[in-house]
Amino acid sequence: MTTGLRYVYAVCRPFSAPLQSQLTGVGGVPPRLLHHHGLVAVVSTVPERHFAEEPLRAHLEDLDWLTETARAHQQVIDALTTVTTPLPLRLATVFRDDSAVRVMMEAREEYFRQTLDRLEGRVEWGVKVYTDAEPGESGEPERAPAKAASGRDYLRRRRDTFRAREDAWQKAEAFATRLHETLCERAEDARLHAPQNPALSGAAGRNVLNAAYLVPRDHSEEFVELVDRTKDEASGMRVELTGPWAAYSFVGDVVGAAGDEENGEGDLP
């Protein structure tokens, strides 16, 4: 009997390609496959002293622990994405034992099958557009402006600075809108996320587009080339492409999708 709780990374269709032999997940434990009703839960065993409801709630306030766990979780999802189409579950989805995982899979079987059918052979690409950092946003000291000759001169400078920023912002918005429309034509689906807070992301400049695109794996190369061609189209802006990822942004669209009850952090049915 395997002791400990079950950490579930993802649900997949059965796949034949082997995972990396040295792959480890949360806590340095290799993931294993739990087959049930034609589906596969990718799980590993984690200690109850860290992942039972109360200690897990405390750990989720520990940024270092959370970062390490998220990195291990993502490592398994990335490995799965190279060999199959995973339906990733939320970070720290934990069940009592294998039987509880099977119960969860049966309860959401229709949702898993519908979503996996929809995502089969597709990956997620992320595209972000930033304006160049304004003075003071880059972290470097802002150069002091020359002293105004008069009050009228000071007000004129303020007005010119405001207009320049407004023009740059409108230009950035127009570029981001045009790029999103173009990418939507090449993608099967898209999601617009809230702009990133630079204080949290650490990225320089203002985030004017934060979007995810669902793209057939076979069409990924031309999607990447399309994004690359836009990078030099607008001065004063930076385009960032990330991926391919498991389709995190596109799970949960099906009616009856697995929601907070199953995917919640630390749920122990």
Image: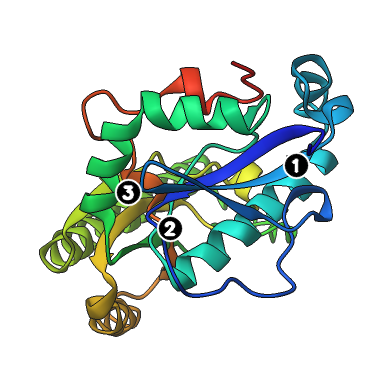
Is 226 left, or right, of 134 in this rendering? left
User: Which element type, helix, strand or loop, lies under badge 1?
Assistant: strand
Residue 13 screen position, x and y as percent: 37, 55
Inspect the image, locate mark 3, and give the three-letter code of the amino acid beneath it: Glu
Can residue 241 be seen here? The reply is: no
Inspect the image, locate mark 2, and give the three-letter code of the amino acid beneath it: Ala
User: Which element type, helix, strand or loop, lies under badge 3?
Assistant: helix
Question: How many neighbours does mark 1 have within 10 angstroms: few (below 14), some (14-19), or many (20 or more)?
Answer: many
Q: Is residue 133 above or below residue 6?
A: below
| Discs 3, 1 touching: Cβ within 8 Å | no
Residue 127 screen position, x and y as percent: 37, 62
User: Which element type, helix, strand or loop, lies under badge 2?
Assistant: loop
Of residue 143 and residue 126, the one placed in the foreground of this image is 126
- Seen at 41% across and 24% down, the residue is 259
Of residue 156 and residue 53, the one placed in the foreground of this image is 53
Is 14 left, or right, of 70 in this rendering? left
- Seen at 18% across and 63% down, the residue is 187
Q: For mark 3, what is the residue?
A: 166
Measured in 3D between alpha carbons, the distance from the residue under mark 3 to the one under mark 1, in whole angstroms, is 54 Å
